[in-house]
Amino acid sequence: PEAITIQELANRMSERAVDVIRMLMKQGAMHKITDVIDADTAQLIAEELGHTVKRVAASDVEEGLFDTVDDSTDTEPRSPVVTVMGHVDHGKTSLLDALRHANVVSGEAGGITQHIGAYQVSSPETGKKITFIDTPGHAAFTAMRARGAKVTDIVVLVVAADDGVMPQTVEAINHAKAARVPIIVAINKIDKPDAKPERVRTELLQHEVQVESFGGEVVDVEVSAKNKTNLDKLLEMIALQAEILDLKTNSHRPAEGTVIEAKLDRGRGPVATVLVQRGTLRVGDIIVAGAEMGRVRALISDQGETVQEAGPSVPVEVLGFNGPPEAGDRLAVVENEARARQITSYRAHQKRENAAASISGMRGSLEQMMS
Ligand code: GTP
Ligand code: MG
């Protein structure tokens, strides 16, 4: 349903809001400046005030931005994208750190200086890469999923062997199931004297996660992030699961991706960590994400190195946005700045209207009215 606030309508016509309200009053409707009116009424008012109306549909503006429906050109293999989830303090960050450092060849140990929300690790067996996303809590994951961004191929569910299945463990299970993403269980803190891995497996069963030793299909690995026990095995299991998923992509097209996190950096301006999902992102590309646009000024790898391009499943820091987009925003490369401006100004406008509509409490009832 399309709707607009009276204020916004007046702004767009460069008319005074009181004149709009007066017109509406003539038609027998009393309104405040913050009220939302439907698109047909708005058009009527605009025409009576002598304006020509051009109604733009979302489908026109967003046309061709993401052709995820057509995956027929996705023929190249790509690395799996893995999200680590689990209850607070069960060792997610420790495990990610251990995996990352286990992978850093000696001499490079001091090389990783900055932490970005996503990075790649090579499997010791095959040398194939695995992309890990360190989502800051479940909220981000939920937000991404709610916006239709599917970023993760596999969830590694971390459960501390001394604590067992806890509320956020269950939440993570539900998220993974809702997103239809396979789970690999990492039973962590196996080094602890009070570790009870068998109890973890039993508790998981109560939440319909059936590990292999219980006749199910979910792989579990006993690990210790602290002692770096079984990390290779975990990587191997991830690689195996990825093989089954047979992930494909196309690197020869304009990039599409998802913003993992973004911030306003004092020195560097807006910085977004982006997971490229299809195509190749290059320095100089004109990009849109949410209501923000820009031109890629620099790309920085998870190793902190400047790179010229980033292909599918590669996480990169992107510099050059005019403002920081939001986590979960989808990134697309567009042909020119005019197109980028058209898309982002339309989206910014939609955002304002949605905000205004929900403030005036009209959105729900309007939607009901028009559905
Ligand atoms: P949040 O981000 O707060 O949800 O926690 P987290 O899941 O990232 O846990 P984190 O890695 O911060 O670890 C929590 C605590 O558990 C820290 O004190 C770690 O040192 C400890 N820890 C993590 N892994 C292990 C392990 O394998 N063995 C032992 N003994 N302690 C561990
Ligand atoms: Mg953590």
Image (tube, rainbow, N blue to C red):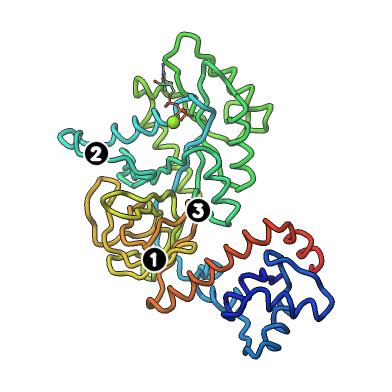
Residue bearing the label numbered 2: 113
Q: Amino acid at mark 3?
A: Gly
81 lies above or below 340: above
Q: Quote the CA–CA distance across marks 3 and 2.
A: 25 Å
Image quarter (top left, top right, bottom left or bottom right) of the N terminus? bottom right
Which amino acid type is shown beneath numbered disc 2?
Thr
Residue 328 shows which numbered tag? 3
Which corner quadrant of the image does residue 39 belong to?
bottom right
Which quadrant is home to the C terminus?
bottom right
Give the residue at the far left of this rendering: 107
Q: CA distance from mark 3 to mark 1?
A: 18 Å
Q: Residue furthest right?
A: 28
Residue 336 in the image: above or below residue 360: below
First reached walking from the N terminus: tag 1 or tag 2: 2
In the image, residue 317 lies at what x, y percent? 33, 53
Q: Residue at x 39, y 51 (%)?
A: 79
Does the Cβ of the disc 2 residue fall within 8 Å of ligand 2? no
